[in-house]
Amino acid sequence: MHTCIFKAKVVELCTDFLYNLKISDFRCITEVSKLTFKIAKRIIYLRKEIKLSQAALAKKIYLSQSQVARLENGKSPLAESIIENLAKTFHVPEHYFHICSKSTENDAVLENAFVRLLYNDIKTVQQLFEQKPFDYEISQEVKFRLLQVIYFYKKNEFDKGQCISDNYIPLFIKTEDDAKECSTLLKFYYLYMVELNFKENKLDICHQYYQLLLNIVTDKYHQARLHLLMAQASVRNAMLSRSLTEINHTISLLESLDSDFLLSSAYLTKSAIFIRLALYDEALRILEKSEAFNKKINNIDIQASIFQNRASIYTKQKKYEKAMKSYVEAYELVTNSHNQSILLISLIICNNKLKNSSNALKWIKILKAKNLREHERMILRSLECEMKLNEQVFDTSQINVVLNYFEEHNSYVDLKYIYSYLADYYFKQNIHKKAAVYYDKRERLEDEKK
């Protein structure tokens, strides 16, 4: 039979076959095709997880590189012999590369894990996430992986979570249809990514997830939570007008909801905005609102932040005794080492302003015992220099070290602080030219910041 006649016969047979298919049968074939394509994505992920190139995998499963590429594009069927070799290579059961039906039991397990993670019950879900998702249907596995990312982040195992987030999630969630399959969990995942990047001060990435969330979040509670996070991000970026708009919108959303935690957090954020705007009396009044809501839930972290904001107001007003009392109250509640260091630095600053060297030394000793970051160590050295200046001891070499460090790192806040106490020191020593130099440096810093 000639080739052209053979092709014509094949086309004719295929046409007859498709013509006689029911629509439901055709949909079934389409769905099978989609699942086959997703199983191909499993191959990509497993290959990358054990750091194999396509060529290296091809050798292990006795195929050419082009054949592996076709497998990973879902353009080539998975013969049983190929599945057997893939299973041996990746150390997974063979059924991992078959299309399987959803298990209601697995759905229940994933739902339970989701609820447990919401309530930060890490221990209960630990056993689940030590297992491999080989018995999950594909959409269930995607949910498993989303939960797994959040689980690792909550355990501060960021590298493990980021690896799944970067390499697995994009393979399976590319379109709106993909997202619909696990929309509730995806909201939770995006929201957690917003919070995580906010804590890491990666505000650009935070904003990207915020935009993704805005497209899918409809309930008022999560909308309010989002606006609160973005108001906080705007405060960090010194975009005070925008942050005030965001926080007012947050509060108006929350007034119709029963959420003392979010309302307390929102008023706390609003107080921080008013502190930045130098509206200290208004900031104190708003802090009282935050504290009133927090009394109903008694959240320690919020209470510590309330004390810290209050102390910041008193520091700005140069009421250092009051500020120290609030900083100590915050320090007694805080457990995070970095936050403790920030509070200790603030206590040393207050004691330096009051020229209380013995008290300053007490807090310096506690701070030195901590595992400090380089930036914190340099701040400590700067504060020690200030304390010595109060005692009329000028440590030129140390002052030059801290000045050089903060100038190299463009640390505006720290430089402004050092320029201020150096200018004041020289002025009191009647060395007015030197004082003028540092006053001028401080003013230029402020102009650059504006």
Image (tube, rainbow, N blue to C red):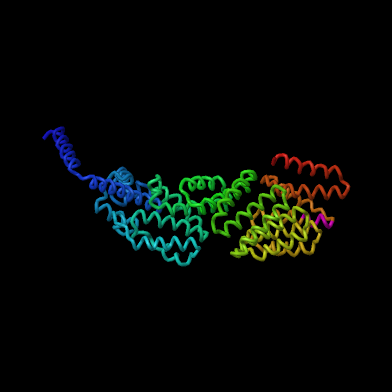
Q: Nearer the viewer, residue 6 or 191?
A: 191
Outermost residue, left side: 1
Q: Nearer the viewer, residue 329 or 255?
A: 255
Report the side of 265 relative to 285 (left or right). left
Outermost residue, right side: 430
* Residue 340: x %, y % from top left: 65, 61
Q: Is residue 265 above or below residue 177?
A: below
Quarter of the rendering containing residue 148: bottom left
Magenta segment includes 196: no
Q: Magenta part of the protein: which range?
A: 385-391
Report the side of 201 relative to 120 (left or right). right
Looking at the rendered structure, the number of numbered marks drawn on it comes to: 0
Quarter of the picture containing the C terminus is top right
Report the side of 392 relative to 53 (left or right). right
* Residue 229: x %, y % from top left: 57, 51
Quarter of the picture containing the N terminus is top left
* Residue 289: x %, y % from top left: 65, 58
